[in-house]
Amino acid sequence: MQIETKIKSNLKKLNNSIIKCRKCPRLVKFREKISKKKRKQYINESYWGKPVTGFGDIDGKILFVGLAPAAHGATRTGRVFTGDKSSDFLYKCLFKAKISNKNSSKNIKDGLKLNNAFITLALKCVPPGDKPDSRELNNCSNFFNQELNNLKNLRVIVALGKIAFDACFYFYKKNLNLKERLIFSHGEIYNLPNSIKLVGCYHPSPRNVNTGRINEKKMVSLFNKIKKLN
């Protein structure tokens, strides 16, 4: 109980540091621009407009990692994979795999909970063109490292998309001396240092869904497979 309380306290401090971060001028400028120049259907909403923290079960064995907040999803709502079409598809699949208690992720007050899983982002701010530079990823790698250190039961990292996969590879190569070259492939499982497994997964984007690269059946099948990994 004391350990759990300490972890919650550590994550609260970490999240406060993330929210206040202004290390990357390009990202700060872009996220603030988005928050002022709102999408038409959200014109009456107040955008979060700050870095986005992780969310979920701190005792979970599974960590889902996306690249960065969506411009009018998490940058608007303040919660990772919330309020956009990618999150709609992702949570339909997570719910069917019994990893979430709801089949959608609309806003931070919707009662959503994750079962045995935590979800975060390699980059905490939305980058222009969805393309961060190496310096920006490096700045955020410290936050990612602290998240990993606080997820004491972590066994599996699921990278949602190639860029998130490459960001995880970059992190482990830089910080934990990973020498093997890891190639992104949907469903491919790699062994990382500290007995962690890295799983490649197609990003739940409308483009991937509409082109048939991924569908609910394939995604749910992978999630069920991931639940069995130790």
Image (spheres, rainbow, N blue to C red):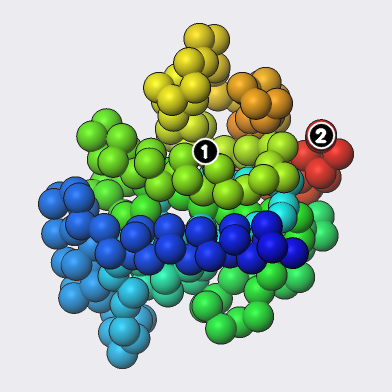
> Is 175 in front, or is 221?
175
Q: Position of residue 130 (x, y in %)?
A: 32, 46
- Residue farthest toward the right in the current orientation of the protein: 228
Q: Amino acid at mark 1?
A: Gly
Q: Is residue 149 visible?
A: yes
Report which residue position mark 2 lands on.
Answer: 230
* Residue occupying the point 19% across, 67% down: 32
In the depicted structure, whether residue 169 falls above or below residue 228: above
- Residue farthest toward the front in the current orientation of the protein: 2
* Residue occupying the point 19% across, 73% down: 37
Left or right placement of residue 179 versus residue 40 in this view? right
Left or right placement of residue 141 versus residue 178 in this view? left
Q: Where is residue 141, by image quadrant?
A: top left
Q: Amino acid at mark 2?
A: Asn
Indicate which label's residue lies in the foreground, 2 or 1: 2
Helix, strand or loop status at disc 1: loop
* Residue occupying the point 58% across, 49% down: 150
- Residue farthest toward the bottom in the current orientation of the protein: 44
Nearer-N-terminus badge (2/1): 1
Left or right placement of residue 59 versus residue 211 in this view? right
Left or right placement of residue 28 versus residue 215 in this view? left
Q: CA distance from mark 2 to mark 1?
A: 22 Å
Q: Is residue 204 visible?
A: no
> Is 137 in front, or is 6?
6
Helix, strand or loop status at disc 2: loop
The quarter in which the C terminus is drawn is top right
* Residue occupying the point 42% across, 74% down: 77
Report which residue position mark 1 lands on.
Answer: 161
- Check whether the beta carbons of the residues at disc 2 and disc 1 lie within 8 A of each other: no
